[in-house]
Amino acid sequence: MSVFRPSTNTLARLAFAALLAGPVVALAFVLLYARTPFFTNQAFPVQQPVQFDHRHHAADDGIDCRYCHALATRSSTAGLPSSERCLGCHAQIWNKSPLLEPVRESFFSDRPIPWRRVHTLPGFVFFNHSAHLAKGIGCRSCHGRVDQMPAVEQVSPLNMGWCLGCHRAPEAELRPPEQIASMTWEPPPDRERLARELAARYQVHARVSCSTCHR
């Protein structure tokens, strides 16, 4: 009399297959999850201590990105607006609004506004805002249509593959210097010719060595 039923062989084969497939499935899950917005922090609007609507300031009023992010053209970081910068306008406009209470409190207490970071890179990654702007990369290339966001969110994955995609062929993202901060600029029909001209003008070429970003 047999101790095991015939179906036991099938169960044993399935269990063995599961043991072999388990690590592969787990690795595939990790790799797929790393590409989702939940891992890259994309598409999650960040609420700030001051209710600042970029649609109004950047689109309706046409305020240049570099007015608030004044370090972007000369520093590795873009910088954040101080209470003094905010009150440069709002000392005259909407100066009684309760929405501006955090700004007034910051100004009179001499403490910076506790802005919340939207875009975060690992500590082992070097990124310089001024270098990218000086070479013709516009704000929109990385930050998206900020002028359409009530609260700013990260639209690009900011992972290594995404960065290398641009570093291998940067010509497609180049803009004339006067259009660096524009959210609405579109390249002309002869885009390839303009890209070649701008690449020569900015002296741009592919940069994919490890030391470019990891120093």
Image (cartoon, rainbow, N blue to C red):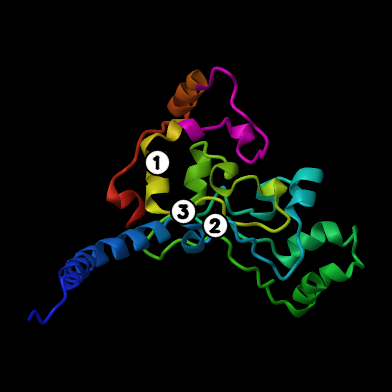
Q: Which residue is mark 2?
A: 42
Residue at 76% x, 56% y: name it: 53
Q: Which residue is mark 3?
A: 158
Residue type at tag 1: Gly
Distance CA(mark 2)–CA(mark 1): 18 Å
Closer to us: mark 2 or mark 1?
A: 2
Mark 1: secondary structure: helix
Q: Is residue 16 left or right of residue 55?
A: left
Residue 128 versus residue 39: which sits nearer the camera?
A: 39
Q: State the residue at coordinates (54%, 42%).
A: 141
Mark 3 crowdedness (10 Å alpha carbons): few <14, some 14-19, many ≥20: some
Residue 168 visible from this viewpoint: yes
Q: Position of residue 86 (x, y in %)?
A: 77, 61
Residue 62 visible (yes or no):
no
The image shows residue 57, relative to residue 7, as above or below, that is above
- The magenta-colored residue range is 172-191
How many numbered discs sit on the rendered protein?
Answer: 3
Q: Secondary structure at mark 2?
A: loop
Numbered mark located on residue 165 in the image? 1
Magenta segment includes 84: no
Using a 10 Å C-alpha cutoff, classify the residue at mark 1 as few (fewer than 14 neighbours), some (14 to 19) or many (20 or more): few
